[in-house]
Image: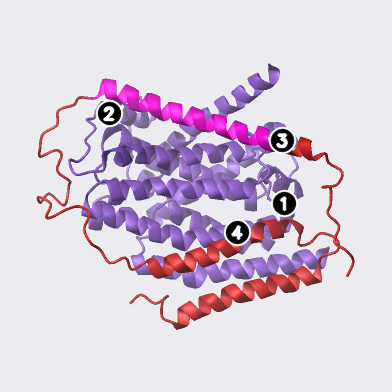
Chain colours: A red, B purple
Amino acid sequence: MPEPTVVGASTVDPTVVAADYFQSYSVVGLLAVVGVLFVAVAFGAGRLLRPVVPTPEKLLTYECGVDPVGEGWAHTQVRYYVYAFLYVIFAVDSIFLFPWATVFAAPGYGAATLVEMFVFLGFLAVGLLYAYKKGVLAWT
Amino acid sequence: MNDALDVALRLLIVFVVFLTFPLIIGQTEHKVMAHMQGRLGPMYAGGFHGWAQLVADGVKFAQKEDVVPAGADRRIFQLAPAVALLPYLLVLLAIPIGPGEGAVGEVVDAGVFFVLAVMGVGVLGSLMAGWASANKFSLLGGLRTAAQLLAYELPMLLTAASVAMAAGTVSLPGILDAFEWWWLPWQIVGAIVFFVAGLAELQRPPFDMPVADSEIIFGAYTEYTGLRFALFLLAEYAGIVVLCGLTTVLFLGGWHGPWGADGLGWVWTLLKTALLAFVVIWLRVTYPRLREDQLQKLSWTLLVPLSLAQIALTGIVKVVIQ
């Protein structure tokens, strides 16, 4: 197999790339500041416009019109934790797809990366099948 | 100085789009839903077919008392709407609307990756609201939101990765530059999976179990009033804009049009986005709400396998045509 060649990277000055990188994300940061300002102004203006007349009844939580029983933070059985596991496994795996996706068809890769992809998909599919066999994906 | 002005202009445009497009979609939803259900919808506010209904709603929201329940975790409760809303503003910045560097808020080279990561943050707002409200129904709604995110984030990630594979880049303008018309049939399964998963992540009907009004009042948003409630609503509609825009860019070729109309790329983007937004509304009127287990089942046993199959197909075709 020929050595994979990295396209483009060697011809571009790394400092220029870094400058672009910081420039685009500083604009994102600037927009985030605009957003935070918008929310702050909206909340501030809301504070000036709205009436404040709290009564104990108003400050109760609304639970179908009946006075709430016990605390709001009740003990519940979190049935979703198995999916949380499944999700973490799958999501972490699929994050690695993105850097791979940009190079897998570059000259010098081709068939080998395709086989790798099927190994990768195979692992995910087996994981899903295993969860299915365990009855995790049946709810009734 | 010119650069600063340019950046300021871009931010302003993105911000204005962020404030107006959700309202336009909201008003369209009022009218479209009404006509699909054989009624008129808002007709009074503003005179002409109730065009100012949402403005009137906004005025009403701003005048409402802001009630924080006595038992609530005050800070978290008050911050939650902002956390739910702002990610969509950031995502809008990265969506290209026309060809060239000029027609996008800012070229973010990690485009797809950035967009999906930031969109995921929005759900935290619902979680915070559900937890901090000190209300059992809110807590249930919050947990349902979490379960829904866990199930549907995955097919979304996988199908987006499929497009990145096809284009060989994760930059959104880069993906559009590489787009060819035959990607449409090639990526159609991915497109449908992405759109459906996106709907579920926005908790739009038929995936609105987390806010199911007949069971848990309004889920995580039960205790919210006035402006904060309005911000949650705005977040939902901004989410529709973002989802439709992203589906357009990733799967429908964004500014590419069938007749290669030069200079009209942005019209195509807007047209496709609007069409998808209409589909979102249409689905709301058409389908009944899915039950919680049906929601999970749809994702894990249908959408995830489909998106894995799409990745396999993308990989094979891409390597064969090289």
Over which residues does the magenta segment extend?
A: A21-50
**Who is closer to the viewer here, B195 or B300?**
B300
Subunit of label 3 = A
Q: Identify the image quadrant of the N terminus of chain B.
A: top right
Q: CA distance from mark 4 to mark 3?
A: 23 Å
Q: Residues within 10 Å of mark 1 (few under 14, many from 20)?
A: many
Q: Are marks 3 and 2 on the same chain?
A: no
Tell me the residue at 65%/45% (across/down): B254
Above or below, comparing residue B238 to residue B183 in the picture: above
Residue under numbered circle 3: A20
Asked whether, in this view, residue B158 is left or right of residue A111, the answer is left
For the residue marked with disc 1, what is the amino acid?
Thr
**Who is closer to the viewer here, A125 or B63?**
A125
Residue under numbered circle 4: A95
Q: Check residue B60 in the rendering and tell me which mark sits there, or answer none.
A: 2
Subunit of label 1 = B
Label 3–label 2 contact, CB within 8 A: no
Tell me the residue at 45%/61% (across/down): B150
Residue under numbered circle 1: B169
Q: Residues within 10 Å of mark 4 (few under 14, many from 20)?
A: some
Magenta-drawn stretch contains A43: yes
For the residue marked with disc 2, what is the amino acid?
Lys
Pointer 4 or 3: first along the chain: 3
